[in-house]
Image (tube, helix red, strand yellow):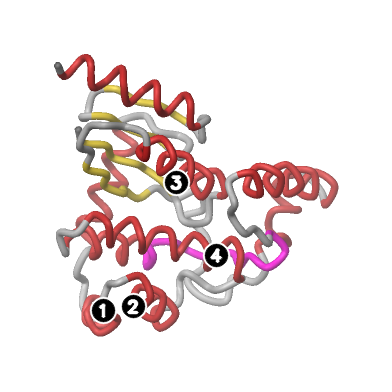
Amino acid sequence: MKIDIFSDIVCPWCYLGQARMRAALKDFPGEVEVSWRPFQLDPSAPVRDGGLASDWLREKFGGADKVAAANDQMRALTAAEGLPYEPGLTRRSNTVPAHRVVWLAGEAGDRAVQDAVVSRLFRAHHAEGLDVSDEETLAALAGEAGLPGVRVREMFASQEGMAEIGADLENARALGITGVPFFLFEGQWAVSGAQSTEVLSAALTEVAGKLG
């Protein structure tokens, strides 16, 4: 079974969604190939030095109280999945550079490495306050996850991956995706949002039955 997961590194629901899908896959007996696809929640974000995300979020969502309430909700949900979460540290970042790294990991042909890269970037943004638009930071993080940093630097020295990221973003628009995470099974069946592990498990079983 093939699953494409459209997500954005700066999306806390995507961070949560990865953990829940991993849990669902642990108990699923079938063979599954997961590919991570890009989506941008904030395409206007600057590359590097975007400042604290909280400043921008307060302006976007109407004040500190609303942001604090959303952070409290997410802190409880991530804690339940064993995920570190420090929203006060997060930086506003344009995620195209991060998506290029995730794409490169997928091109290397090892989906486990791609998943590890995604996980490392999620943690860097949501728990460590690192700038996931900074190329040197991304190369170091990728190296920790099993994708050689030298290969990441080679990519950033060229336009490699830009056309592919653009095509995937266009595909997301064509599919009508307006929020993430978005789980697309076999290009035909979809589950939207950071659903529970139980819902994702049920979706895996249902799709497996349809595939025979």
* Residue 143: assigned label: 2
Task: Identify the image quadrant of the N terminus.
Answer: top left
Of marks 4 and 1, the one in the foreground? 1
In the image, residue 55 lies in the stretch drawn in magenta? no
Q: Position of residue 95 (x, y in %)?
A: 44, 61
Q: Secondary structure at mark 2?
A: helix
Tag 2 near tag 1, CB within 8 Å: yes
Amino acid type at image mark 1: Pro
Q: Earlier in the sequence, mark 3 or mark 1?
A: 3
Q: CA distance from mark 3 to mark 2?
A: 20 Å
* Residue 18: assigned label: 3
Amino acid type at image mark 2: Gly
Q: Categorize mark 3 by other alpha carbons within 10 Å: few (<14), some (14-19), many (20+).
A: some
Q: Nearer the viewer, residue 18 or 96?
A: 18
Of marks 4 and 3, the one in the foreground? 3
Residue depicted at x 27% and y 44% = 34
Residue linked to disc 4: 125
In the image, residue 162 above or below residue 140: above
* Residue 116: assigned label: none
Tag 4 near tag 2, CB within 8 Å: no
Q: CA distance from mark 2 to mark 1?
A: 5 Å
Q: Position of residue 7 (x, y in %)?
A: 41, 46
Q: Categorize mark 4 by other alpha carbons within 10 Å: few (<14), some (14-19), many (20+).
A: many
Residue linked to disc 1: 148
In the image, residue 39 above or below residue 151: above
In the image, residue 161 above or below residue 143: above
In the image, residue 161 above or below residue 172: below
